[in-house]
Image: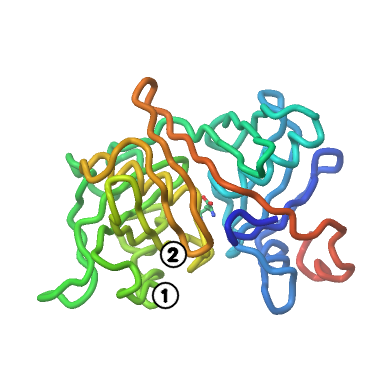
Amino acid sequence: MNGLGNDFVVLDARADALALVPDAIRAIADRKEGIGCDQLVALEPSTKADVFMRIWNADGGEVAACGNAARCVAALVAAEQGRPQVSIETEDQVLGALVGSDNQVTIDMGVPRLAWNEIPLAEPFHDTRRIELQAGPIDAPVMHSPAVVNVGNPHALFFVDDVEAIDLGRIGSMLEHHPLFPERANISLVQVLSPGHLKIRTWERGAGLTRACGTAACASAVAAIRRELTGRKVKVSLPGGDLVIEWREADGHVLMTGPYALDFEGTLPEGLLAGAGV
Ligand SMILES: N[C@@H](CCC[C@H](N)C(=O)O)C(=O)O
């Protein structure tokens, strides 16, 4: 499946438990030898929600949130259950979802975490709207003072004049592994096009440059709203398409709305996992 080009292999492990080791995940995610995806997702039984969604990045590391995959999984479960409202448990929280008849899915991503130790950062910062971090030559940093937000996973958001002018592919890994981020971080460039419209590009932790990152869109909107650059509802344009993000005033929840797509349905090719330790 994919959400705006952020692609996933979704495995149904509800009847038969899966024991995937990182080598197996990397083998499936490999774009040359395997199926190829940004994230691998397993559907598991849940006692708290309609389904449990386990998520691994292409590098084999397990993570607690994936906005685009949540829309895809919500659409699958809603079709199975024959109702538009479903819930998804993750390692982080239970997400509510509403699947529309127009291919659009809204996910309630919960309340963003903003304190330095919730991101987490390696050292205290009182104001996470802007933290001290410079990227580029010391005397002329091209990127500096990112906002940081956790929406189930850690994000650093660099506000820039033009997201296309920076070679994110070159500096993304270095920023992802910056010592300020003890759990590493997803790195985004954010451009304010208008008070209702952001444009972003994201280097994903454990996956690299992506066509779209749902949690990055949520984190970017939260950061822009905290800096009073936009209203509480914004369109976020990503290389793969658009999402609408609302940070609801009443309860502080972030709502993400966007499409999903089913690319292919079948079984894993035989031999793909041979020698991968499954
Ligand atoms: N593609 C996802 C985010 C996947 C996890 C992320 N790379 C992390 O390590 O936290 C999305 O759409 O949110």
As rendered, which of 277 and 197 lies closer to the eye? 197
Relative placement, left or right, of 74 versus 15 is: left
Q: Label 2 to label 1, Cα distance in Å?
A: 7 Å
For residue 10, above or below residue 76: below
| Residue 249 visible in the shown view | yes
Residue 19 is situated, as x and y percent measured from the top left of the image, at 76, 50
Residue 22 is situated, as x and y percent measured from the top left of the image, at 65, 61
Figure colour scheme: rainbow
Relative placement, left or right, of 175 versus 1 is: left
Q: Which residue is mark 2?
A: 203
Q: Residue furthest right?
A: 270
Among numbered discs 2 and 1, the one appearing first in the sequence: 1
Q: Which residue is mark 1?
A: 169
Ligand 1 lies under 8 Å from the Cβ of mark 2: no
Residue 155 is situated, as x and y percent measured from the top left of the image, at 38, 51
The secondary element bearing badge 2 is classed as strand
Residue at 43 percent across and 56 percent down: it is: 237
Residue at 19 percent across and 44 percent down: it is: 125
Residue 71: name its quadrant.
top right
Amino acid identity at mark 1: Gly
